[in-house]
Each structure stands twice: as structure tokens, then as C-alpha cells.
Image (cartoon, rainbow, N blue to C red):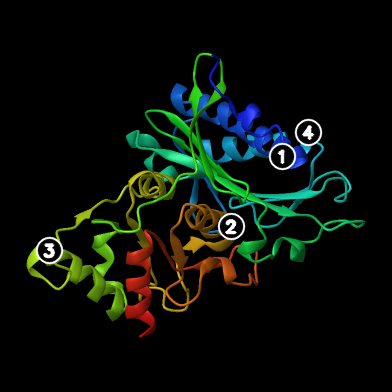
Amino acid sequence: MPAKTLPDALADAGDLGRLILVVADACVEISRLVRGGGAHVMGALESENIQGEVQKKLDVLSNDILIKAGEDCGLLAGMASEEVDTIHPVGDGASGPYLLLFDPLDGSSNIEVNVSIGTIFSVLAAPAGRAVAEADFLQAGRKQLAAGYVVYGPQTTLVVTLGQGVQIFTLDPDDGAWVFTAEGVQAPAETKEFAINMSNMRHWAEPMRRYIDECLQGETGPRGKNFNMRWVASMVADVHRIVSRGGVFMYPWDAREPNKPGKLRLMYEANPMSLLIEQAGGKATDCNTPILDIQPTSLHQRVSVVLGSQAEVERVTAYTCG
């Protein structure tokens, strides 16, 4: 019997399913570039993105691939990318029912060292009967119609939700087909793993330092169990581990930039990942509010992120809000 593929899984999802297929096909092209390497895709450019970060060649190429795919599919009124300062209307800005937001290449600092990187995307409803405006993208995360990410690692893996559970597909590199791997994925509620950049511990607020310190005390400490730390410096890789086997991922407020609530982008990273985690039975918070309940105020808004297994996220929230 032939293996179930992504088109099979999305056969009843209508235009939304068609859009997911468009994004997935674009990610197949990005995956080929990542696997191929070479001077034409490796290295940095002299340009910076809207975040003030030096762009890699693959950042720009991946962004271009997704923009081109979105322009050609006939399903979008507009797009927004982490790499671009403003929105990208499609056609007259009123020709499609959806808005697409994406981080074209998450974790691109890992490109040269051959560590997993990925693409994150989010789908929102477009306004009806008029051209799209930037304000139309500023929808709370709970209004997402779909979200997903692709990990370019030892395998290329697509994880996606249309708001009714989480499905996983693996790319067959021989024919470019996304083959069904798992559905109804649930992250374990309990965990012994946390993912955070420990080198920044001295810059965190006291409640976050307390949480990590208790984890580090192991089975003789207040938690009564030994924890392992994991940190890939690629959100897609760290979140994929949590989806697969549980854990908690944290990118908290940092005293070096006290006026910024966090580093990660609400619209391109935190919202889509939070929807996936909640659909997998976990939780996601900015340490005060569920991320999906935050009302965005700007296209490149930043946010603190704690997401993953339910029990650990609730404990962090209790420490920071208590």
C-alpha cells in the first residue's frame, strides 16, 4: 500500500490545504539549497535585515523562494517576512483569502557549522473586499488558521497544524514527496529537559534564575530529579525536540536590553510555535500571558518565550507571576 503523503492528508482542507502545499513545496527547494551548500549559498552578505542582524546568503535566497511561491499561488492577499521591514502585498492586495507570515531561515547562525536550521510559517485570514494593510497582520495568535515549521536536519521534517492537532511529515529526497510520519502528536506533560542559553543566566530576572538553579540542583534539590540541558541555538530544532519527546524552551527577558520584552519575534516565531505546542498539549507564555492571547502592536514585535511541557511552563509562570 502506498505511503500516505501530505496532499492525501490535506485533501479535505480546501484552499487552506492548497496553501500549506505551496509552502511545503517552497521548503523542498530551500532544503535542496541547504543540502547542496557551496559558495553560492554559504556565507554572509554586507546587508542587514530589519532586526539589525547581518543577513546570510541563505536567508535572502530562502526569503525569495517563499515570496515567489506566495506570489504565484493565487491564494494570498499579502505576506510578511522577518527579513523585510514591511508587508508584501500580492497583486492588488485583495486577490486571496489568506495572509502568510514566515521566518524564512530560522537559526541561520548555524549554517556554516552544519547544525539544524529551519523555516517557520503562520497563516491568517485576509480582509475581504479591500486591499490588505499592515494592521491586518496584527492579529492575536489564536486567530491563526494554520502554522508549521520545517527542520532541515539529518532528515527534512514538516510539522504542521490546521488547528485540529499536529501532524508530522518527512521529505523523501528522491522524489520530493512529504511522507506521513505521525498525527495527533502530544508532547509529554512532564519532562527532565530544558533548553536555554545558560551563558546569559547573569542577565535574567530573579524568577528565571531561580527556576534554572532549582533544575541544576538535581535529585537532591527541591525538584527531586536530575535535569538535562539542551540548546541548539535554532528554535525549530529545540521546539522539534519538545514536540517529539517533551521539554521546555526558554528565551526570557534580558537585562542587557531592559526595554525589550525579549528577543524572539511574536509574529514569525512565537505565535506559530505556540499554536503548535498548544495543539500538542503543551503551553506557551511570555512569563505573564499566554502568547496566543497577546494582541500584537507592531509587525516585528518581540516577546519573551517559555513553551513546552505543561507542568514546567506552569511552574515558570508561577515563579514569574507569583
Name the kind of residue labelled 1 in the image.
Ala
Mark seen at residue 50: 2
**Residue at 41% in and 50% down:** 239
Residue drawn at x 68%, y 52% as measured from the top left: 145
**Residue identified by numbered label 1:** 13
| Residue 248 x %, y % | 34, 58
Dividing the picture into quadrants, the one containing residue 307 is bottom left
Tag 3–tag 1 contact (CB < 8 Å): no
Instruction: Say which label, 2 or 4, has the lower sequence index.
Output: 2
Identified by mark 4, the residue type is Asp
- The residue where tag 4 is placed is 72
Label for residue 311?
none
Real-space CA distance between mark 3 and mark 4, rounded to the nearest whole angstrom: 53 Å
User: What's the distance in space between the residues labelled 2 and 1, CA to CA?
Assistant: 34 Å
Amino acid type at image mark 3: Gly
Distance Cα–Cα, label 2 vs label 4: 25 Å
Q: Secondary structure at mark 4?
A: helix
Circle 2 SS class = loop
SS for callout 3:
helix
Q: Position of residue 163 (x, y in %)?
A: 61, 51
How far, Cα to Cα, is label 1 from label 4? 20 Å
Q: Earlier in the sequence, mark 1 or mark 4?
A: 1
Q: Which residue is mark 3?
A: 218
Residue 16 visible in the displayed image: yes
> In whole angstroms, how far apart are the C-alphas of marks 3 and 2?
41 Å
Residue at point 46%, 69% (across, down): 285
Nearer-the-camera pick, 320 or 4: 4
Cβ–Cβ under 8 Å for marks 1 and 4 = no
Say whether disc 3 or disc 1 marks the residue closer to the N-terminus.
1
